[in-house]
Image (cartoon, helix red, strand yellow):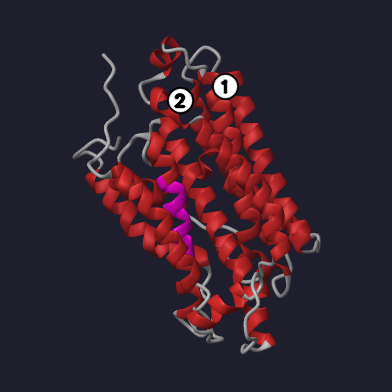
Amino acid sequence: MLKAVSQPEGATLKLLLLPVVLVVVFFMSFVVGSYPISIETVLAIIAGKFISLPHYWTNDMETVVFKIRLPRIIAAILVGAALSTSGAAYQGMFKNPMVSPGILGVSAGASFGAALAILLSYNIVGIQLGAFIGGILAVMITYFISVWLGRNGDTMLVMILTGIIVGMLFSSFLSLIKYAADPYTKLPTITYWLMGSLASININDVEVASIPIVLGLAAVMLVRWNLNVMSFGEEEASALGVNTGRVRFVVILCATMMTASAVAISGMIGLVGLIVPHLARMLVGPDYKVLLPAAMLLGACFLLLVDNLARTLYAVEIPLGILTSLIGAPFFLYLLINSKKKGWA
């Protein structure tokens, strides 16, 4: 007998409050930074683009708001939403709470592609394109090998194991590139990129990355009801009329596209796709009808807050990957300790 997916009390209300939290964090993020601008001035500068207001702010303030902070804030929202939604979708599809967006090798492939572009002296567009192509290539290899090997067995298990092997392979390629890179020029650039950062983001990067991320988010949201059914198992889902192969392909394609796009503009930012879905599950429960939107909004808020910390904790900006790992590692340990005490879904 199938067990109905339940929601904790007030899950819908909590979901409705998350956009409000995101809007508050969005506007407060304009105030954070080495160049002080009050929230009243920020609101006036933004409103001044739509209505006529007394121009009491300087051109430097307007440049900081629109050319520096706005692209970075939007990028943090997009990257956080993409990674957390991908993680939540993968965890549901694989029925494993420890799965993250990099499980099929996309992160290792994107790192290899970016490092290769840096080694070949490509510009920032070439680096982002290399990361995107590398991530897509790694997942394509994983997917087709797992489909070929898992025809008469557990396709999901074979896919996870294949993803681990492909990830290790691309990580080895990355190590070769780092070994061959000039230790005074290329190697520091590769190392810094792998730490993850939004410091050099611009509006063009945001425009390019927003297309695959928004399309991926929309497609995953459309199939989120099917993820509830797939959590019962392949046979049960098929008996209920769900085309499991099609749903699996859509989720893998969209999650890969979102993760590769996010990594391409931000570098490696770990554990967001692992810890945020669990936070969303604690908040609204395991029903994917509300879990995926909650994970998307929480991921956007989480990475935006972490990016604000990266800009303000020290005079020199801290890479995002370091902060997310420092925050996520204790939480991951907590999950491991409590994984045997109660179910995750």
* Residue 3 on image: x %, y %: 26, 22
One can see residue 118 in this view: yes
Q: Is residue 64 above or below residue 19?
A: below
Q: So how many labels did they put on this image?
A: 2
Front-lying residue, 209 or 175: 209
Q: Estimate how packed mark 2 is, as few (under 14), some (14 to 19) or many (20 or more) residues with alpha carbons within 10 Å.
A: many
Quarter of the image holding residue 181?
Answer: bottom right
Residue at the disc numbered 1: 246
Q: Is residue 95 above or below residue 278?
A: above
**Amino acid carrying mark 2 in the image:** Asn
Q: Secondary structure at mark 2?
A: helix
Q: Quarter of the image containing the C terminus? A: top left
Q: Residue furthest front?
A: 52
Q: Earlier in the sequence, mark 2 or mark 1?
A: 2
**Drawn side of residue 302 relative to residue 79, left or right:** left
Residue at the disc numbered 2: 226
**Amino acid carrying mark 1 in the image:** Arg
